[in-house]
């Protein structure tokens, strides 16, 4: 398996604050698409990052060696609508918990 940190770059820095109705609908489609990949253990974690210089989306993917990460992320409804794009970064190593809550 290969693991990737993927950064979804929206079309403008203030994207989250200036969403159109069409973009809001596509974000819901994106979330459903990601949820499906999560349920199939393709996405390990995903969500929005509130960066003061411009928010973006992130996802960590775990895919077979024979698969191309760009061929997967190009299927994102936002990318299909030509609203934003991805940057892909291979992870040398990935350690992840299996639970959804911390026991501190």
Image: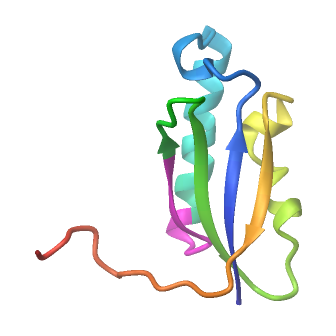
Instruction: From the viewer's side, name the closer residue of 86 and 71.
Output: 86
In the picture, residue 96 is in which quadrant?
bottom left
Instruction: From the viewer's side, name the closer residue of 87 and 34.
Output: 87
In the picture, residue 102 is in which quadrant?
bottom left
Please say whether residue 32 is one of the residues in the magenta stretch.
no
Q: Residue at x 86, y 29 (%)?
A: 82
In the picture, residue 97 is in which quadrant?
bottom left
Is residue 30 rendered to the left or right of residue 64? left
Q: In which quarter of the image is the C terminus?
A: bottom left
Q: Count the marks: how many?
A: 0
| Position of 53 relative to 33 (above/below) | above
Q: In the rendering, at what x and y percent does residue 101 appear?
A: 21, 68
Is residue 104 rendered to the left or right of residue 39? left
Q: Residue at x 78, y 61 (%)?
A: 88
Q: Can you name the residue that lies furthest to the left here? A: 104
Q: Residue at x 61, y 87 (%)?
A: 93
Q: In the rendering, at what x and y percent does residue 92 appear?
A: 68, 85
Q: In the rendering, at what x and y percent does residue 34 appear?
A: 59, 53
Q: What's drawn in magenta, residue-wise?
A: 38-47
Q: In the rendering, at what x and y percent does residue 91 appear?
A: 68, 78
Q: In which quarter of the image is the N terminus?
A: bottom right
Please say whether residue 45 is one of the residues in the magenta stretch.
yes
Is residue 54 rendered to the left or right of residue 9? left
Task: Give the image's coloring scheme.
Answer: rainbow
| Position of 83 relative to 86 (above/below) | above
């Amino acid at each position: 398996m290969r693991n990737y940190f993927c950064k979804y770059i929206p079309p403008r820095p203030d994207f989250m604050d200036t969403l159109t109705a069409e973009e809001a609908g596509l974000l819901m489609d994106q979330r459903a698409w990601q949820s499906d990949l999560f349920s199939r253990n393709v996405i390990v974690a995903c969500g929005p990052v509130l960066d003061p210089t411009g928010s973006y989306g992130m996802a960590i993917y775990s895919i077979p060696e024979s698969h191309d990460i760009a061929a997967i992320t190009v299927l994102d409804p936002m990318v299909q609508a030509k609203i934003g794009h991805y940057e892909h970064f291979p992870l040398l190593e990935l350690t992840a918990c299996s639970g959804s809550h911390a026991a501190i």
